[in-house]
Amino acid sequence: QAKICAILPRRSCFSRKSSSNPTKRQIVAANVDTVFLVSGLDRNFSPRRVERYLVAAAESGAEPVIVLNKTDLCDAVGDAVKAIQVITESVPIHTTSSSEPDGLNQLEVYLRHGRTVAFLGSSGVGKSTIINFLLGSNRQETQSVRQRDQRGRHTTAHRELLVRSKGGVIIDTPGMRELQLWDSDRALESAFDDIDVFSQACRFRDCQHQTEPGCAVRQAVSDGQLTTDRLSHYHQL
Ligand SMILES: Nc1nc2c(ncn2[C@@H]2O[C@H](COP(=O)(O)OP(=O)(O)OP(=O)(O)O)[C@@H](O)[C@H]2O)c(=O)[nH]1
Ligand SMILES: [Zn+2]
């Protein structure tokens, strides 16, 4: 028989819109310390998607760590890393491959005792493979990527909180795997803290940095302090 002894305050949480009531939010995972944002460096690699995951991480309150997996399938790992460095200066970036333990071992530091980690990333990027490595056993069942579309098969069927004997807890739930953006206005700003800084000087507090007069963000672009790419990424999101 289970007994609730204490309810800890919520330091961070991932949530999504409830499917039955879209105005309600549903908590998917709470008190995650580190969230790994996993991409595969095969031909579906998209810095834009990483940006979206950074938004989700920022709104959760968990510390993001970017993982670029499948380096063995990419001839230009350095270029991929540079494309991510343009998006963020402060978030750690790790390159990994299932055939190279060195990169994967670097993820161990985020799994100290008492720390909780979770994973965000498209289907087939290698989340289960990385989790298996960190667990040191074949805890998760993985299936081969379907040939046509490079997507893996969803093999995780139920809620799972995996306690590592070496320290740390891994949350791997279907909810995390299907996460959608929520509450994005606030989070958008923190994922774009450079734009945030310039926008303090915009004439209008609700400036969208489009055609408003006195927009300090567009001024920063014309002064060369901010790239056009950066601003258009902001507008796309
Ligand atoms: N070449 C290569 N293949 C990898 C690597 N990591 C994982 N894979 C393969 O990619 C496929 C998908 O890996 P998974 O770990 O199941 O991916 P996932 O992100 O958990 O996928 P979902 O369960 O669908 O969310 C499997 O066939 C893995 O063996 C890697 O670094 N290099
Ligand atoms: Zn503005």
Image (cartoon, rainbow, N blue to C red):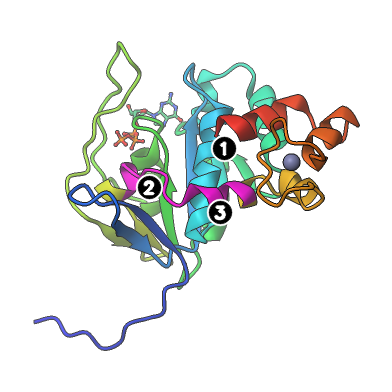
Front one among 172 and 235: 235
Q: In this orientation, does residue 235 appear?
A: yes
Task: State which region is magenta.
Answer: 176-189
Regarding ligand 2, which quadrant of the image does it lie in? Answer: top right
Ranked by sequence position, the earlier of labels 2 and 1 is 1
Ranked by sequence position, the earlier of labels 3 and 1 is 1
- Tag 2 residue: 131
What's the amino acid at mark 3? Arg
Q: CA distance from mark 2 to mark 1?
A: 23 Å
Q: Is residue 149 above or below residue 106?
A: above
- Tag 1 residue: 51
Instruction: Say whether marks 3 and 1 touch (CB < 8 Å).
Output: no
Image mark for residue 186 = 3
Q: Is mark 2 within 8 Å of ligand 1?
A: yes
x, y percentage for residue 143?
A: 24, 29
| Residue at x 41% of width, y 79% of height | 9
Q: Which structural element holds mark 3? A: helix
- Say whether residue 145 is left or right of residue 117: left
Front one among 220 and 116: 220
Determine if the magenta segment contains residue 93.
Answer: no
Q: CA distance from mark 3 to mark 1?
A: 15 Å
Label 1: how many Cα within 10 Å (few below 14, some 14–19, many 20+): many
What's the amino acid at mark 1? Glu
Q: Which structural element holds mark 1? A: helix
